[in-house]
Image: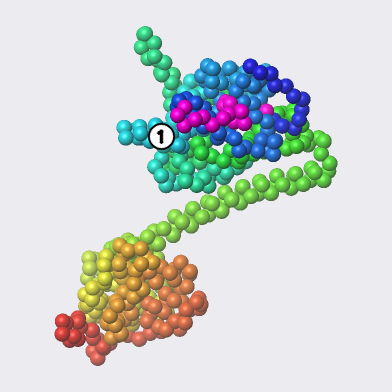
Amino acid sequence: MAAHTTGPNGLVPVHVAVHDPAQMEEPDPRAADYARKLFAASAKYADISWTRYGAEPRWLDMDTSTCVAAINPSHFSGHGADEFDRFLSGVALRGEPALIIATMGTADDDEDRVRSVFGRPGGRVDFRHFNGAIIGERLLAGAEVSLVPGLDAADHDLGLRLLNRKDAPWWAMTLQASALASPRGTTVHEPEGELLPILVDSLGKPVVARWTSADGQQIWYVIPDAVDWNQVVDWLVQRALPEHVPAALRRVRSRHHLDPALETLTETQARSDLEELERRYLEDKTRLEDELQRARQDAEPVRAGLLYGTGSVLEDAVAVVLRAAGFVVIDLDEELGGTLSADLLAVRNGSTCLVEVKAAAGAAGEKLISQLQRHLDKWPQLRTGQPVTCAALIVNHQHRLDPAERPAEVYQRRVVDVLPFPVIASGDLFRWWRTQDWSAVQAAVLGQAHSGGGRDEPPAGGREIPAVGRKRWRPWTKGGTA
């Protein structure tokens, strides 16, 4: 093994278990797979600006005893096992934890794609001197991942850097036991250490994680293949080493570290202000994320009900909006029992409105209008002492279509021009609820004109719909109007 010794030069030595890409020549296309794989493994690190980020790579056949971190170290003899052991011995002698970055899976592994016919392709990361391994299951294209809340600054920063990877695969990770086969049988050793998720998939499984041994002597960051290694090396020096191996930066006199005892008052104040800003940012971000989550939980039943709901789900969402707009809402199905009348009674400032709520998977049928008309005719028999002054038909029409693809009007024919009550699309109700335009909701339900945009309450009042002399609607016939 070639010797490599330098004095403090401001660069932290990092072991990378491949051959120096600058010394590798691209093999002939007819060369053996082994040679092509060696070249491809080194080529992944060819474009890293090591010096710019304050690091110095130590490749295979270089001394690794002074390295402060390792990238994809190898367990295999002749392929990096000796360098890995010297690295571990060096950090143990200095009383520091071994900081290791390992990639899960291989993004462009054709063999994995072939094996996917017989099972999902994956990856594996084995520990050194500890039981257990991290097994990866490659996720399907388009998998969504998210950042775990409450991370420390270093892990949070890594998660943000990896969150926006484009068109690159993810692997869902699981900590798995080790199995050792012998003539006497197979011995299973439970996995050691703790796997802390940093990024997770939609099912909550980690796709980026930190594994720490029980004694704290090894810290593994497991990240997916196909990353921007400049980002990772920058994070290693700027975030991971100050967090886990701060002495390493002092030892090489890194420009990324200065002992607080040697700072000027101006430097100390600026650093303190920056740390306070980061602390407040994390607190505010956590608080705002919680507020957003609560707001979405409150909004989703109404949003889903108005845009996609049918039956009681739609009725409940309409009732929520009417109450928010200042109406006293009574569920008539619950109060009167069954379907004796319309769905809701909405009362506001002397106006009493009978509200029928319906859904139509396709174009709304005109029989919905007849149903509300019958309820209006029957109402005096149900509540003799409480006459209605208005009515409204609210319809979630074409609810199988995306809201943007639905016609704006519930009825395309001008049948509504002769009705004594308004027909309101539940999508309009959603829009007014979303923007808190309560005056628009009030005007629509009460059948009043509304200029739009404001939130002032419309004039109170309204008139009773007379039982006799009222404009009556009858269904369209094939020959025209009845």
Name the residue at the right extreme: 264
Report the residue at 31% width, 32% height from top: 118
Looking at the rendering, in which quadrant would you find the N terminus? top right
Q: Is residue 109 left or right of residue 67?
A: left
Q: State the extent of the magenta-drawn residues as a range.
A: 13-31
Query: Residue 419: percent from the left, percent from the top?
Result: 28, 83
The residue beneath circle 1 is 110
Q: Nearer the viewer, residue 209 or 282?
A: 209
Query: Residue 396: percent from the left, percent from the top?
Result: 32, 68
Q: Dot 1: what SS?
A: helix
Q: Is residue 327 left or right of residue 94?
A: left
Q: Is residue 235 left or right of residue 471?
A: right
Query: Residue 404: percent from the left, percent from the top?
Result: 38, 66
Q: Nearer the viewer, residue 395 or 226?
A: 226
Examine the structure image and report whether residue 311 is included in the region drawn in magenta: no
Residue 181 visible: yes
Magenta stretch: dominant SS? loop
Residue 220 visible: no
Q: How many marks?
A: 1
**Amino acid on which disc 1 is placed:** Asp
Q: Is residue 7 left or right of residue 92?
A: right
Report the residue at 43% width, 69% height from top: 431
